[in-house]
Structures are given as C-alpha cells and as structure tokens.
Amino acid sequence: MKRNVLRATDSTEELSRLIRQACLVAKDSAFNVREFVRDSSKMAYLAVKDCEKELDRIERDVDERMTSAITQVSEAQARELLACLKFIIDLERIGDLLWSAVKRLHEIRSAVSRNDTFDLLEMSSVLEQMLERIHQGFIERDLQNAHWVLRTDARIDQACAAVFRRHLEIGNRRHREHSTNLLFVAQAFERAGDHAKNLSEELVHLIEGRSVRHEQKRRQAQA
C-alpha cells in the first residue's frame, strides 16, 4: 500500500513538473514572437518553431503518463492531474497559435506599419507576462497571479481591436491581402490570450475548488 502511495505521488509530481516546463516553453515562445516582431530575427523565428514542437512533445508525454497515473491517486491528487491535463491542452494550443502568427508575419514583415508593430508588440509582451504569472501561480498556488491574468487579458483584446479597426477601414484593394494576414495574426494573439485566461481560471479551480467561469455565467444570467 505504501509503495502505491509513493508511486502515485511520484506520478503527480512528474506531471506537475511537465506542466511547469510547458509554461516556461510557452512563455519563451511569446518572448521570441516579440523579438521577431521587433527585428525579424531568424533565430527568434526558429525558436518559436522549436517551442511549438516541444509543447507537442510535452502534451504527448502528459497523455501517455496520465492514463496510468489517474488510477493510482487520491481525490486531491486526481484534481491536480486533471488540472495538468487541462493546462497542457491550453499551453499546446498557445504554441500552435504563436507559430501560426509568426509564419504569417514572416510573409509580410517588411510591410508592417509602425502602428501595427506597436500593437503586435503589446500583445506579445502582455501574453509573455501572463504566461509568467501562470507559471508562478502554478508553482506557488497563488491566487493573486491568477486574478492578475484574468484582469490583464483585456489589454490583448484592446490591442487586437485596434488592429481590426485600422484594417477594416482600409478600402484600397491592393492592401486587402496584407490586411487579411495582419487580422489573422492579431486574432491568433487574441485567441492565445483567451487560452492564457483559461489557464488562470483553471488555476483558481485547482487552488480553491471553484469554477470562475461558471460563477461569471451565473452573474451574467442574473444581471
């Protein structure tokens, strides 16, 4: 019995370690996206690609370990394992979105205006900060970091909206393809921010055992 408890604890700790690693990889991806937006660095471009591959690998590793681990653990450990599973889904998706954004930027980089560059830098910088807070919050089981991420997602939404306003107003057909690409990039950042927000909601659930998302829906229904 004692051996089973130790094995279950080891499994939970290993999966938690993988999630901490994945948080750092996703944060590194956001950092390198920002560097690519700033100066079209080839090293940054390749780093984002590597981060996407690494997040895919970690997701596979988590999936493989989860099946055996979930049958051996206590209720509290099971809740942590389920949180790990939800975390890696969102983190892997963030990696996909950032890689897709960088590939589009690579095609149009020389034509990105100063205003667009400012908003893209804002989104990538904020996303990097959000992922750092998620990482710290997961390690320390800290609600303040989770709530900071919940509040800060609006900054990405605002920058994304600014890009959309600017390019939906462009009537010149010659620039339509360029604008479409930039809109896809902005939307990728906005969706990555949504996934980071999901992570903060899951962090609250892990720490307090309550669903922020369900509470928000209930308040909206009562309003």
Image: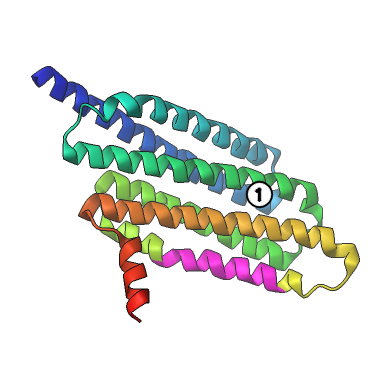
Whether residue 93 is situated above or below residue 111 in the rendered picture: above
For the point 17% across and 39% down, the residue is 75
Q: Residue 132: x and y, percent?
A: 41, 50
Instruction: Return the residue nearer the eye: 99 or 73.
Output: 73
Label 1 secondary element:
helix
Residue 197 among those drawn in magenta: no
The reply, left or right, for residue 168 in relation to residue 137 is right
Q: Residue 171: x and y, percent?
A: 85, 73
What amino acid is labelled 1 in the image?
Ala
Q: Residue 136: x and y, percent?
A: 33, 48
For the question of whether residue 28 can be seen, the reply is no
Q: Residues within 10 Å of mark 1 (few under 14, many from 20)?
A: many
Residue furthest to the left in view is: 1
Identify the residue position indicated by label 1 in the image.
101
Based on the displayed image, in which of its 4 quarters is residue 14 positioned?
top left
Whether residue 80 is situated above or below residue 129 in the rendered picture: above
Location of the C terminus by quadrant is bottom left
Q: Which residues are magenta?
A: 151-165
Whether residue 143 is situated above or below residue 166 in the rendered picture: above
For the point 69% across and 56% down, the residue is 184
Residue furthest to the right in view is: 174
Secondary structure of the magenta portion, mostly?
A: helix
Residue furthest to the top in view is: 3
